[in-house]
Amino acid sequence: MKRGLFACVLLSASLAQAQDFDANEMVSAHNRWRKTVGAPPLSYSTDLAASAQEWANHLKQDNHCRMQHSKPNGRYGENLFWASAVQWSDGRRELQKVGPNTVVDDWGSERSNYNYKSNSCTKGKMCGHYTQLVWKTTTTVGCAVAICEDSHDQIWVCQYQPPGNWVGKKPY
């Protein structure tokens, strides 16, 4: 099967400091969106979280915190989120406060771009993060974040098993 609806999102959120995230909070944020379409709740996978951390670290170290999907070859699905630093008029850069709800709600906000009847995104809009988020047969998620010290940008990675976004299949 071929996979489709693969996309990336850029977001600059509010200010303050970044915080470590709680896996339970991340799963709850996912499951809140899944519940709206009757998809079963996800559980957290430490194996997927380790894989997501490995990819987030790669993006930090080798890609200057620029988003790029890994090449999962159908092993898992993946959503990415990037947040810029807060930049002050004097040139200082600080981490902004971003947590699981901000990240997952950003992906979930693509719901308005998704047409269930035609199983497609609004022309020129993204909805693949949303469809992966609520993909009914996905059972586990693992997530990670990496902070680029020089820029104070952050990159978030969530990986999903089994993957969603199969061409021609509806998410729920």
Image (cartoon, rainbow, N blue to C red):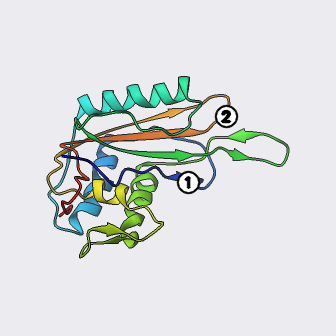
In the picture, measured across the screen, residue 17 lies left or right of residue 27, that is right
Mark 2 lies on residue: 151
Q: Position of residue 114 (x, y in %)?
A: 34, 69
- Coordinates of residue 141 in the picture (x, y in percent): 26, 42
Residue 57: x percent and y percent? 47, 26
Q: Which residue is mark 1?
A: 11
Can you tell which mark lies on residue 25?
none
Most extreme residue toward the right, as rendered? Answer: 90
Tally of numbered discs: 2
Out of 158 and 77, give the one closest to the viewer.
77
Q: Are marks 2 and 1 in contact (CB under 8 Å)?
A: no
Q: Nearer the viewer, residue 97 or 160?
A: 160
Q: Helix or strand or loop: what does disc 2 sit on? A: loop
Res 163 quadrant in image: top left
Is 135 left or right of 94, judged from the image as shown? left
150 to 97, vertically: above or below = above
- Indicate the amino acid at tag 2: Ser
- Give neighbour class at mark 2: few <14, some 14-19, many 20+ (Cα, 10 Å): some
Question: Horizontal placement of 116 versus 156: left or right?
Answer: left
Residue found 22% across the figure and 56% down from its top: 135
Task: Give the amino acid at mark 1.
Answer: Leu
Residue at (38, 33) in percent of width and height: 70
Marked residue nearer the N-terminal end (2 or 1): 1
Quadrant including the C terminus: bottom left
Separation of disc 2 and disc 1 at Cα? 15 Å
Could you say where residue 60 lies in the image, as x and y percent from the top left? 53, 28
Determine the secondary structure under disc 1. Answer: strand
**Mark 1 residue crowding within 10 angstroms, few (<14) / some (14–19) / many (20+):** few
